Image (tube, grey):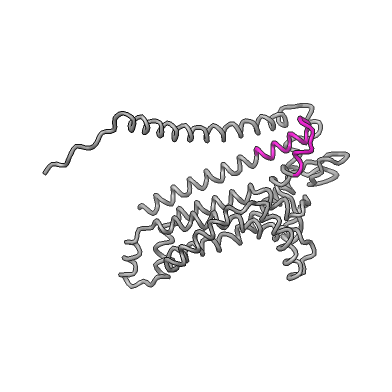
Amino acid sequence: MESPDPILLTGKPRRLEGLIELFIRSSGWIVIASVILIFVFVGKEAVPLLTSAEIHKEVTVGKMLAPQPESGYSWQPVSEVPKYSLLPLLIGTLKVTLVALIIALPIAVGAAIFTSEFAPQAVREVIKPAVELLAGIPSVVIGFFSLMVLATWLQDTFGIMIRLNAITAGIGLALAVIPIVYTVSEDALSAVPQSFRDGSQALGANRWQTAWRVVLPAATPGVFAACVLGAGRSIGETMIVLMASGNAATMSLDPTRSFRSFSATIAAELGEVVHGDPHYRVLFFIGAALFVITFLLNLAGHAYVGRLKRKLAG
């Protein structure tokens, strides 16, 4: 018996489908255009730092990266003799990002493996939405919690002299990163075909061996992408770091000391600078640098994920 002819869309349904397709395409192009325009604006404001002879009398890119004869590496843009070294800010950014990722990645990936491979369905239906709800908590709330509760607890428990430091900010930042890494990792693990698990267990492997040696390697591209997203969030986060870091631009690798990050510097100082002066241009240069760093991180992550997929595909 021949199958009936497919129903052809005509009239209003066809026009509605065309409008929906146009809306989706337009939304995609609007997002792309918005990102490009943001980068163009930030870059336009930062370019005079590279081209203006007047600004070069006070600061250049070379001076921001090299130690100065009198002050060494110092960020003091409003002092009598302005100092614009970016090294203290870079160290602070990397320090808090490292602390946050050391805490967040094992917890998030471990929780994703548990809910995907071991938790009963009823437990999974509670844990997954609960963790995902954490992503909706405003950064300022996490920052306030870190400032008022976490910093005091860490100081009283471990005797840390400086209560606002990279450990405090890193733990607060980890609370914001965990939901992102968990959600993407759990989706990647759940997407592994059930036949992989069945085949492994048929060969005598237990659930833990199956999860560790079969499911996790198969989901590695997705888990790695989740970690890259978490790193990008850590580098660009502002409010948590601004509230819990102490905002001291120091050249210390000690995580128990205060620090200042790139993003927190922009948030703290941009509202008070004079439009067009060297300090203003340096802040936009930092913003452009953050944009480029995040873009390159995502690009490298995408390339590595593609390589992993090709390797797993044989």
- Where does the image place residue 58, in percent across and percent down from the top left? 81, 33
In the image, taking residue 100 as reference, residue 12 lies left or right, namely: left
With 60 as the anchor, is 3 left or right in this view?
left
Which residue is at 53% across, 60% downward? Answer: 130
Which quadrant of the figure contains the N terminus?
top left
Of all residues shown, which one is farthest toward the left?
1
Q: Position of residue 270 (x, y in %)?
A: 75, 39
Question: How many numbered marks have been drawn onto this rendered protein structure?
Answer: 0
Residue reaching furthest to the front: 12
Q: Viewer-proximal residue, 29 or 87? A: 29
- Does 60 appear in magenta? no
* Residue occupying image coordinates x 71% and y 56%: 144
Residue 211 point in image, percent of width and height: 42, 66
**Magenta stretch mostly in which secondary structure?**
helix
Give above or below for 245 relative to 21: below
Residue drawn at the location 36% of the way across and 33% of the way down:
17
Tell me where residue 187 appears, x and y as whole percent: 45, 55
Q: Can you name the residue that lies furthest to the right here? A: 80
Image quarter for residue 193? Answer: bottom left
- 242 lies above or below 22: below
Which residue lies at the image location 26% right of the left edge and 33% below the top edge? 8
Q: Is residue 271 above or below residue 168?
A: above
**Of the pair 258 and 154, the residue shown nearer to us:** 154
Viewer-side residue, 109 vs 56: 109
Direction from residue 23 to residue 47 in the image, left or right? right
Q: Which residues are magenta?
A: 268-288
